[in-house]
Amino acid sequence: MRNSVNRPPTPDAAEDPGKEPTLQEIINIKLIESGEKERLMELLRERLIECGWKDEMKALCRAFIKKKGRSNVTVDDLVHVITPKGRASIPDSIKAELLQRIRAFLVQAAV
Amino acid sequence: MSSKINHHHHHHRFNTQIFPPPCPHLAEFRARNGSKPFRALQDCLRVKPPGGRAAIRRDPSEVPRCGACGESARPRLYACLACAAISCHAPPGPSHAAAHATSMPPGHEIAVDVDRAEIFCCACRDQVYDRDFDAAVVLSQTATLKSATIQSAKPENLRKRRRVDYRPWSPDIRDRVLMETGSSPLENGSDLPRGLRGLNNLGNTCFMNSVLQALLHTPPLRNYFLSDRHNRYYCKKKNGVSNSNAGGKRNVGTADGHGNKNARLCLACDMDAMFSAVFSGDRKPYSPAKFLYSWWQHASNLASYEQQDAHEFFISMLDGIHENVEKDRHKPHSQGHGDCCIAHRVFSGILRSDVMCMTCGFTSTTYDPCVDISLDLEPHQGGSSKSVSTKTHHSCNGEVDGMNPGQNCGISTLMGCLDRFTRPERLGADQKFFCQQCQVRQESLKQMSIRKLPLVSCFHIKRFEHSSIRKMSRKVDRYLQFPFSLDMTPYLSSSILRNRFGNRIFPFDGDEPDASNEMSSEFELFAVVTHTGKLDAGHYVTYLRLSNQWYKCDDAWVTQVNENIVRAAQGYMMFYVQKMLYYKASENRAVS
């Protein structure tokens, strides 16, 4: 990774040789590098639209903004309020499908 | 520099939405960074794969991670616009992005989301919008893709229709005298709405009757003819001489024996006569024989007593009305504009089609006028990538539907058809498209959208399937749910493009700074043409919605029906009118 010229002198944890990357991190990097993460994201987006999850979240956001007044809401407020509901209402079938895809990727990538 | 910011302030009203002013941190950032505050970012914009989302990467293969904690799997990673440091932001947990902003001297508040290419103010903890930034993202996306628009086909501009305020009018004494001496009032003896009159079947002509019933009650078309905008006597007098020549030549071509006798062919005149007859107050079934004869002359290949396709008839007769006007005026009329014949003024919209090369990202855009939208009822198995979606996999037959009501499983809906119509479709190896940039046929991505909505939208459901492989045709009897009120906003080009580019302040195709746009995407159903029976032998019936009551028009018989019967019917053509032109129950009271 190239450092920007103006980069502040913060320690870069990832490049710290003393620290071993965790398995989760390795998988994440593999997913990104292969472009599989992008494909998974696109698949997930499509599924969430199809099952009505996106519309449901949109309605929740609208209701929240209406309640608080449109100039008194930040994106962070929305994320804070909606995230728990959003996570809880993702259909299990979609989670299973993504898990299946990730497993298949790991087998094929021989991680 | 302040001039630049002021300039910015003037444009907050955009596409009918009012955007909040930039936060003080963004304004400060712009003031500090000269005329091109986002120039450094331009080189970091990546779009992968072609047609994908814009992301920020200094290097194409970079895996961005938080500089403070080393996390790369956080959903929100921001790159500081002042120093390019990447930090995570995961409220309500710790925010290294916010910490970065406060630990640095002022100027490090504004950051860009690395996966979405959207800007964020870490001090306000809110998304912020900048027109220059958004324009840079959209343009770089389209510039690297070298997007091309086939200019000739682009609608020059859909003239903004000026809104004219409604002014009620009531006749003064002079008007009243004129009206009383010059006309005889129509009687509306029954409680039935005006213009409800059966049409006699003239020998397998239910395909025609069903479409004519829908057209007779198409609000803008009805208003046009009933307000005498196409007077058949006047048209005859005006065009009698000049047209008989043209008509004569035409009839030789159509191999019609008695061309001289009935030389003048004008479908609009026949429509005018029919409107007069149907709205005369007479309730006895009417025989549209004159119209049928004229249409036979216009479409000689369809002139027979055989059963015809209602949709084919619809297209052919609109074409007939249009053609006549073309002939009349001897000047080019581009379809899709407001200044064409009445048929196109009412029914014509513009479709936009984008085809993107999957290899180089080159996009070619074409615009095509249309008088209706033909929708697939069921995606073909295999082939297109669209059929992979779960929706179609979950499709089940009617019997299963009854078992789990309330669930959307298996019930096709008109909105579902429209979603599929506007969804990007991969044109695979078997249907490669010639890419102008690669100069070879490439796999590509095609997406349709609606550039301009017509006043009246006709949706044609492809129930008659012709398979060239099996050399046979069949009728698809599947049920399709259709709403009485329909919002077309998601299928407009502006919405489709907006989805493609993320949250941007940027004028997309079809965005007009006119509030009427928003209203005109809402539609009300007013007629459904249904088909029962098989491919080669069946019957067309039309349901009409007048003053919010449904009527079944089955050739000569007109009966009042419950709306549930309409909902359960097998729709073949659905006619929707822009909500602002739809007359609700008030219509009757206004008449009396």
Image (spheres, helix red, strand yellow):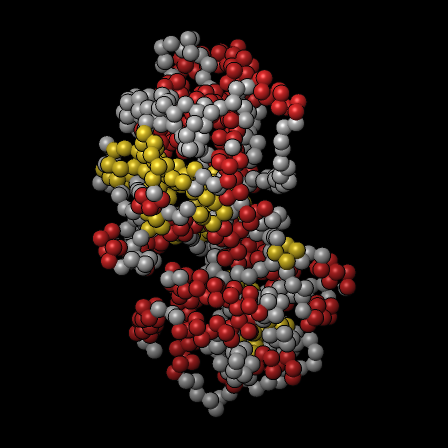
Residue under the point 58% across and 49% down: B511
Quadrant, the C terminus of chain A: bottom left
Q: Determine whether, in the image, residue B171 is placed left or right of residue B366.
A: right
Q: Position of residue B423 (x, y in %)?
A: 42, 52
The picture quadrant where one finds residue A77 is bottom right
Q: Position of residue B166 (x, y in %)?
A: 62, 39
Q: Number of numbered discs present?
A: 0
The picture quadrant where one finds residue B265 is top left
Name the one closer to the observer, B290 or B178.
Answer: B178
Residue under the point 27% across and 46% down: B478
Residue under the point 31% across and 31% down: B554
Q: Determine whether, in the image, residue B545 is placed left or right of residue B122.
A: left
Question: In this view of the protein, can residue B20 be seen by the observer?
Answer: yes
Q: Determine whether, in the image, residue B328 is placed left or right of residue B448.
A: right
Q: Position of residue B415 (x, y in %)?
A: 40, 50
Q: Position of residue B94 (x, y in %)?
A: 54, 83
- The relative height of residue A67 versus residue B98 in the rendered view (above or below) is above
Question: In this view of the protein, can residue B349 be seen by the observer?
Answer: no
Residue under the point 65% across and 63% down: B20
